[in-house]
Image: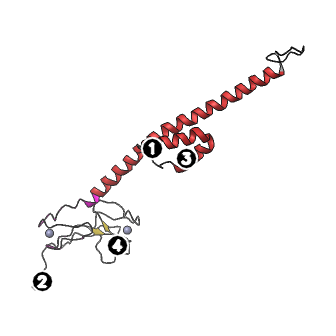
Amino acid sequence: MLDGVGVSWPGGSPENTGLILALIVGAYFVVLWLSAVVWTARDIHQRTTEPMAQIVFTLIVLIFNFPGLVVYRVLRPPLTLQEAEEHRLESTALTRELQQNPPCPRCGYEILADFLACPRCAMPLRMSCSGCDRVLDPSWKICPWCVAPTSAEAPVSANGGERPAPIQAPPEQATAPRSTDG
Ligand SMILES: [Zn+2]
Ligand SMILES: [Zn+2]
C-alpha cells in the first residue's frame, strides 16, 4: 500500500491524484465518444432506412470515434429522409403544375406547354417573354428566366417588343378569324 509522505496531496498521494485525474479525463472522453456514437446513430437513422448503412456508419464512429465522425460526415447521405421527401414533393408538384396543360378553351385541342396559340383555331394562349423569348404563363408577373417584367395587362406579342410600354396598349385584338386560302 502507499505510504503517506506528510505532504497533503489532494486524494492522499501523487499516485491517487494522478489516478483521479486520469479517471476524470477518461470519463470525459468516454462521454464524448458515446455522444458521438449516439449522435451518429440518430443522424444516420434520419438519412437512410438501410440497416446495413446504419450499422456500418455507427460502427465506424464507434471504432474510430472522431476520425470516424469526420469520415461519416463526408460519406453520409446529404439529405435527411424528410428533406428528401420534401424535395421530391416540391419537384413533383412543380412538374405537375408545369405539365398540366388545359386543352384549348375554344376548340378543346390538346395544347403543349410551349404553344403560344392553338394550332387548330389560332386562339392565343400564352405570351412569349420580351427579353428571352421563352413561353410565359399569362398569370406570371415577371419572366422566371430573365426576370423581365411581363406587363401582364398588355400581353407582349412576339413582334420585337424591345422598348418598354408604360401605357397599356389599346384593346385592338382582332378576334375575327383570318381568311386563309385553303
Ligand atoms: Zn383551339
Ligand atoms: Zn425572359
Image coordinates of residue 122 in percent, x first then y, are 17, 73
For the residues labelled 4 and 1, say whether their Cβ atoms are less than 8 Å apart: no
Query: Closer to the camera, 162 or 26?
Result: 26
Q: Quadrant of residue 27?
A: top right
Q: Residues within 10 Å of mark 4 (few under 14, many from 20)?
A: some
User: Disc 3 and disc 4: Cα gap in Å?
Assistant: 44 Å
Q: Which dot marks residue 52?
A: 1
Query: Badge 4 is on which residue?
Result: 133
Query: Which residue reaches farthest front?
Result: 1
For the residues labelled 2 and 3, say whether their Cβ atoms are less than 8 Å apart: no
Mark toward the viewer: 4 or 1? 1
Q: Name which residue type carries label 2.
A: Thr
Q: Secondary structure at mark 2?
A: loop
User: Disc 2 and disc 4: Cα gap in Å?
Assistant: 27 Å
Q: Earlier along the polypeptide chain: callout 1 or callout 2? A: 1
Mark toward the viewer: 2 or 3? 3
